[in-house]
Amino acid sequence: MILTRYIMGWYPSKLIVVLTLVIFIGYMMIDAVVGGQILSAVADGDLSVIVGIVVTCVVTWVVSTLGYGVFHVYERYAWIPQLIVISILAGVAGPKFDLYGNPSAALSSHVVAGNRLSFFSLCLAAIITYAQGAADFFVYYPVETSRWKVFVSTMAGLVSSSTYALVIGVGLGSGVATNPDWSAAYQRGQGALLVEGLKPLGSFGSFCSVILALSLIGNMVPPTYASGIDFQALGRHWEKVPRIVWNTVALLIAMVCGIAGRGHLAEIFTNFLAIMGYWVSIWVAIVLEEHLVFRKWTRLGWDWESWNDRTRLPMGIAALVAFLVGWVGSILCMAQVWYVGPLAKLISEYGGDMGNYVGFAWAAIVYPPLRWVELRQFGR
């Protein structure tokens, strides 16, 4: 998030930091709740969801607070048992996937197109939020690391892992509509549905379910670690507090919210986090143009020594205005459970979520001329 100071300026960058913390803590809460649901379902209700949430959060805290070295080693190997168990889940639950049913048969082509666009946008929103924490991890790489290797490894990791999990999720979702046992399990939570999918394996299925619950820790560790750095990016007083303290605060917030809202808040927050992808898309557009046009093409360069000197950082007026304009475009074109924008309704009565793309485009159009004026006026 320190990088954001070079684009948004000293004060506007704090808004981006707060939004990033909302994303990180929100996903931590959702993962903790699902992990708690899995552990509770495995124990057949003898272990409460609350205890499961606490166990998940405690293990996450241990890994994330030991530092980047331990965190990196954990993430390097944690995906292996996850991949094995998810593959087992696909093999066991696969026969119950409704692969040939067509729930959209009675819908018009416009509604189907809008629904598909909205689903793709939802998937994108979940993946693109990694952009906010990427710099917190890549900063530890040697300066001579190939930029292409970083790009390819990041894209390959995000696309392959997300695609596999999403496909399995779609299969489970199709089975919920046709399988009464799956439907009943889903009513208890997403975690219970995963356990139900592995139920034919008996005790081994329960073991695999525990692995799935623990695998969610791998998803919680990165945002927990990065949230500590982001809290410090809020200002000079905040940066004096050790990262481990902020990690603990972020995880406690996620745990308390998860426990308090394990019944409904997690589902509500899932819908809310879908719109968080909008501002990340807008932010990415501004960052790309700042780097490619103003820092690289005009040879303005990056003064990395000024990261904590607001008198040498950009004013941030151009970025803030472009950010807000992008948000206007996103709101007009969003299609969510609780609101469908007027432009999104042009696709169908249910809309089609175009918020990510229109927000990106509007910000990208507005930012260059505003930034040029800002540079001419203030020189930074």
Image (cartoon, rainbow, N blue to C red):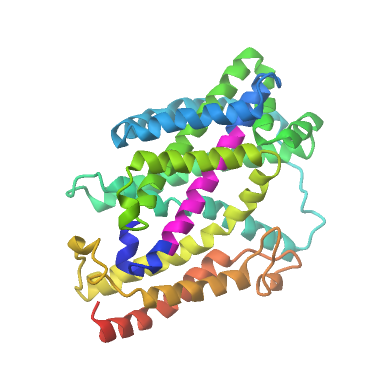
Q: Position of residue 56 (x, y in %)?
A: 52, 29
Q: Residue at x 38, y 64 (%)?
A: 13
Q: Classify residue 322 by image quadrant.
A: bottom left
Res. 198 visible in picture = no
Depth order, front residue of 131/118: 131
Depth order, front residue of 282/378: 378
- Vertical relation: 322 (above or below) 266: below
* Left or right of residue 303: residue 348: right
Q: Is residue 111 magenta?
A: no
| Magenta stretch, overall SS | helix
* Left or right of residue 125: residue 230: left
- Looking at the rendered image, the quarter that the C terminus falls into is bottom left
Depth order, front residue of 94/3: 3
Res. 311 visible in picture = yes
Task: Tell me which segment is drawn in magenta.
Answer: 15-34
Q: Position of residue 173 (x, y in %)?
A: 69, 40
* Left or right of residue 44: residue 19: left
Q: Is residue 28 magenta?
A: yes
- Vertical relation: 203 (above or below) 213: above
Q: Position of residue 326 (x, y in %)?
A: 50, 72
Q: Position of residue 349 (x, y in %)?
A: 76, 67
* Left or right of residue 229: residue 251: right
